[in-house]
Amino acid sequence: SQTIHQWPATLVQPVGSPLSLECTVEGTSNPNLYWYRQAAGRGLQLLFYSVGIGQISSEVPQNLSASRPQDRQFILSSKKLLLSDSGFYLCAWRQGPWNTEAFFGQGTRLTVV
Amino acid sequence: GDSVTQMEGPVTLSEEAFLTINCTYTATGYPSLFWYVQYPGEGLQLLLKATKADDKGSNKGFEATYRKETTSFHLEKGSVQVSDSAVYFCALSDLQAGTALIFGKGTTLSVSS
């Protein structure tokens, strides 16, 4: 069966520090991968998605970047965090056609102080 | 562009009450529709889905019917339990809109005994 791992679960980082969040999927190949951010009262905002290795699409221009160095690995990064980067970050994967469901990781609670 | 609108929360109910959470959508194509649930501190879990008009998705006592004529996918449960307390998200996937799911802002449900 397929599983998705996301870490760390919580993170407290100072303003201006770098960020690296990692997500890996097991039990499938060539998944579509997604990074969402959830801010209080604002639902889920799609940040990046990837349909293959090295292919990244950005939905919202901002202080973050994403990379997909391997088929089932998706990394969210920042060179210098801002206070506004605080939130709950969720990785998700999806297989097959557009009408299938997405599966989510457990999320990372990021607090920038 | 495509969008999902959910009723504003929080929704506060007593145990065994009837639940309705309204969801309407705007889509350029013919979307698939989903309900996800998020328990505190966790990622999102698929609750149910429907891929074509008049389909009824159901799971754990929850139901939602895909109504193309009213562009709606309202979530219902006949008798809620304290354990149903969570945030509920309506979402759509539309080939015309790309590969990602588009979410509503979420509705917080609180059930008291």
Image (cartoon, grey):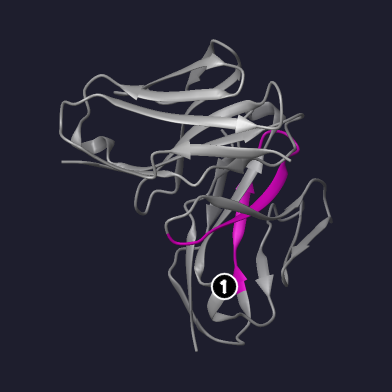
Name the foreground residue: B7 vs A6.
A6
Residue that mark 1 sits on: B84
Q: Estimate the x, y position of residue B8 in percent, counting from the top left.
A: 45, 63
Q: Is residue B92 above or below residue B78?
A: above
> Which residue is situated farthest in the top direction here?
A54
Name the foreground residue: A77 vs A39.
A77
Q: Estimate the x, y position of residue A8 in percent, counting from the top left.
A: 38, 39
What amino acid is at disc 1? Asp
Q: Quadrant of residue A7?
A: top left
Q: How many marks?
A: 1
Q: Estimate the x, y position of residue B30 in percent, counting from the top left.
A: 76, 38
Q: Is residue B98 visible?
A: no
Q: Look at the image and give the residue range highlighted in magenta.
A: B20-40
Q: Is residue B103 above or below residue B75?
A: above
Q: Quick check: A47 left or right of B78?
A: left
Q: Is residue A91 magenta?
A: no
